[in-house]
Image (cartoon, rainbow, N blue to C red):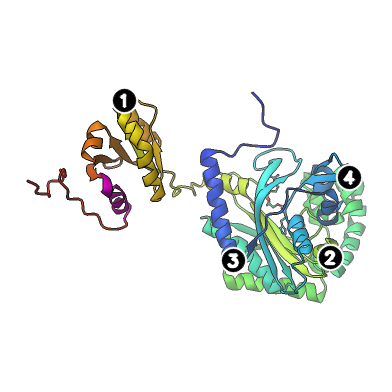
Amino acid sequence: MFNLVKGTHDVIIDEARKYSYIETVLTKVAELYNYKEFRTPILETSELFLRSVGDSSDIVRKEMYTFLDKGGRSITLRPEITAGTIRSMVNNKLFAMEDYPVKGYYVGPNFRYERPQQGRYRQFNQFGVECVGVIKPERDSEIISMGYNALMMLGFENVTLKINTLGDDESRTKYREALKEYFSKYLDEMCEDCKERFELNILRILDCKVPHDIEIVKNAPKISDYLTESAKNSFEIVKKNLDDLGIPYEVDDSLVRGLDYYSGVVFEFHYTSSLGKNYGAIGAGGHYSNLVKEIGGPQVEGCGFAMGIERLASVMNDDNLFADLDDSLDVYLMPMGEKAVDASLLIANEIRMSGYSCEICLENKGFGQMFKKAERRKANYALIIGNEELETGVYTLKDMKTKEQFTVEKDKLIDKLDYEYGEGEYEHHHDHCDCGECSHE
Ligand code: HAM
């Protein structure tokens, strides 16, 4: 027995099906907004994340899986996918034509050496989007609403959307000075992390979860008092757009986000499941002004968000939002006897190539056990083929729900399945038909 690496988890069978479903819905939403898929490597140079996520962020300082490869290069397992996506846009010269915006979506695993807890893993999956170009506030609003709509499409009803603005560079410079002045008075009584944040990225103090520090933060200067006219104006437009779209939100002026690349509007989606469980933000993102330039591209802005698939799956499980997911099997094929076993591969092939899922019972159990197995496999139909059926060329098909049993001519099996699944016509009368309607001599 080998244990899982701490903070990792297997996603198998039912859970994997749920993940696939979530990813299919989210991908569909991305396509509705005309985003194109980006599949970038999990391995990136460590430098990429120092430059983007930022060397003052917790992610870079404490959480990255970084190692030297055999060639002595510093490599990092990506802790998020924004940086890699922008890097690929730059490397593939997608900005060369200035055909803005460049829009990408992605799905895949990320790695952060965090303390594992409810909703927090060391390997976890994200779906996300990035939109890069000349970004107007309306584009920010469109992206926020895209995240919101995606959650609606997954069946969420009451999502809490928190938004804030970090302003432009000028607003933040002024705001940082005000925070420095304020927090320097309390620094001695604050936690060690805050002391570090004071030096590295003072805005992150606003995000501190230590009760005593929260009290100090309450009276700290607010970003809204330090915004330039244009930053204030952009934020007003975003709020108006969200109002017009009927998307409820809360302005949370302590929302600063843990990655260094943000400027302008930032946002998080929160949700408490019906079991009262909160797994942390289910999605988050924001606007970035200098990231593309930092990574070697032109001075263009961008906006995006990412959602945690694990957190979405947990909440959706609690709230029974997977209820409609169908994992039934179309046909459970039960060959009785050696000749039937021999014929079963060909019959199953025909069924599958016609688009119906099919499993053959080759375990040679008795009739009763086979039916039990068909039930466990959630089969809609059992197809029984014995020697007699092979000889006459007429099979027995049993509807596992109604327990109704039909006889079906070999050549009409697929027609019958089409008919049962609501497609096509089926002429069932035949020489051996026992439907009661047929009159055969
Ligand atoms: P983030 O807030 O670090 O942002 O992560 C986005 C989402 O990923 C979180 O809201 C959460 O659902 C999920 N997540 C993060 N860490 C974990 C974890 N340890 N375990 C499980 N789920 C987790 C970003 O990653 C940015 N790249 C988002 C973005 C895209 N901003 C602009 N574009």
Question: Which amino acid lies under the numbered mark 1 shown in the image of this protein?
Answer: Gly
Residue at 86% across / 47% down in the picture? Answer: 194
Q: Tell me which numbered mark, 4 or 1, is placed earlier along the sequence.
A: 4
Camera-nearest label, 4 or 1: 1
Question: Which amino acid lies under the numbered mark 3 shown in the image of this protein?
Answer: Ile
At numbered mark 1, what does the secondary structure look like: helix, strand or loop? loop
Camera-nearest label, 1 or 3: 1
Q: Which mark is residue 366?
A: 1
The image quarter containing residue 362 is: top left
Magenta residue span: 410-422
Q: Residues within 10 Å of mark 2 (few under 14, many from 20)?
A: some
Query: Could you tell me how many numbered marks the image carries?
Result: 4
- The residue singled out by tag 4 in the image is 189
**With 419 as the anchor, is 186 left or right in this view?**
right
The image quarter containing residue 87 is: bottom right
Give me the C-alpha separation between circle 2 and circle 3: 32 Å
188 and 394: which is toward the camera: 394
Q: Where is residue 370 shown, x and y percent of the image?
A: 34, 30
